Image (cartoon, grey):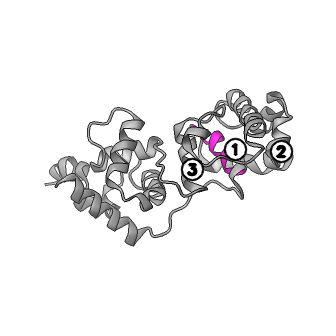
Amino acid sequence: MQIKERFEKVIEWFKVNMPVAVSELNYTNPYELMVATILSAQCTDKRVNQITPELLKRFSTPEKLAEAEPGEVFEYIWSCSYPNNKAKHLVGMARKLVADYKGVMPDEVDELVKMPGVGRKTASVIASVIFNKPALAVDTHVFRVAARIGLAINSKTPLETEKQLISYIPQEMIPIAHHWLILHGRYVCVARKPKCEICGLQPFCAYYNNICKKITI
């Protein structure tokens, strides 16, 4: 199967079977999503959603977080992965947001990555989810699923995967495609034992047709 055809069939399947796909992080505004996304690095959304209510109750605005010290933030996020670094990143992000952007979240990836703790993946999440920009965040799920299905060929880095994906996915569908791949990787195309037997992408999946199908024949 040619890669263009595979993209077309995968996109069509998701459009029919997952017409609504959104972030599983809880948030009500750009600042809250930024905080949650920084916390989500190598941490589950479930854990982040347990942490953010009290954290955001105490630091409800970028201005309040900017006035805090990392040690104070740590007390609220100690149960997530790498809490020391994330506490520093959260405070640094808030101070930069207040000082340089007057507390208003920028909508471009190139501006977002200027803030402490905000890499390309986090910036793409904000640009895509909040501002509906054609930015595709490549986390571990997206990286794995894209390679398995055959949407990313010989990709060695998240950036390579991102470039391949956005070159074939229609621009207006890039924001939702990010969630399609994440949710598929989280619940079906899992890391150790992908649930190929229940996956609707079997007919167009490179992994299934090159490996799993041959084993069962």
Residue at position x 52%, y 38% from top? 120
Residue at position x 81%, y 36% from top? 66
Q: Which residue is mark 1?
A: 35
Q: Secondary structure at mark 1?
A: helix
Mark 3 or 1: in front is: 3
Asked if disc 1 and disc 2 are in contact, CB closer than 8 Å, the reply is: yes
Amino acid type, residue under disc 2 in the picture? Phe
Q: Is 208 displayed left or right of 11 in the figure?
A: left
Q: CA distance from mark 3 to mark 2?
A: 22 Å
Q: Which residue is mark 3?
A: 127
Q: Of callouts 3 and 1, which one flags the residue occurring earlier in the amino acid sequence?
A: 1
- Look at the picture and state if 172 lies above or below 75: below
Tag of residue 59: 2
User: For residue 16, what is the image quadrant?
Assistant: bottom left
Q: Secondary structure at mark 2?
A: loop
Q: Which residue of the protein is positioned furthest toward the bottom in this rendering? A: 16
Q: Is 140 displayed left or right of 102 in the figure?
A: left
Most frequent secondary structure within the magenta stretch: helix
Count of marks placed on residues: 3
Q: Of callouts 3 and 2, which one flags the residue occurring earlier in the amino acid sequence?
A: 2
Q: For this rendering, which residue is in front, 168 or 86?
A: 168
Q: Is 185 displayed left or right of 9 in the figure?
A: right
Amino acid type, residue under disc 1 in the picture? Val
Identify the image quadrant of the N terminus: bottom left
Tag of residue 73: none
Residue 47 visible to an observer of this rendering: yes
User: For residue 77, what is the image quadrant?
Assistant: top right
Q: How many neighbours does mark 2 have within 10 angstroms: few (below 14), some (14-19), or many (20 or more)? A: some
- Residues in magenta? 32-41
Amino acid type, residue under disc 3 in the picture? Ala
Q: CA distance from mark 3 to mark 1?
A: 14 Å
Identify the image quadrant of the C terminus: bottom left
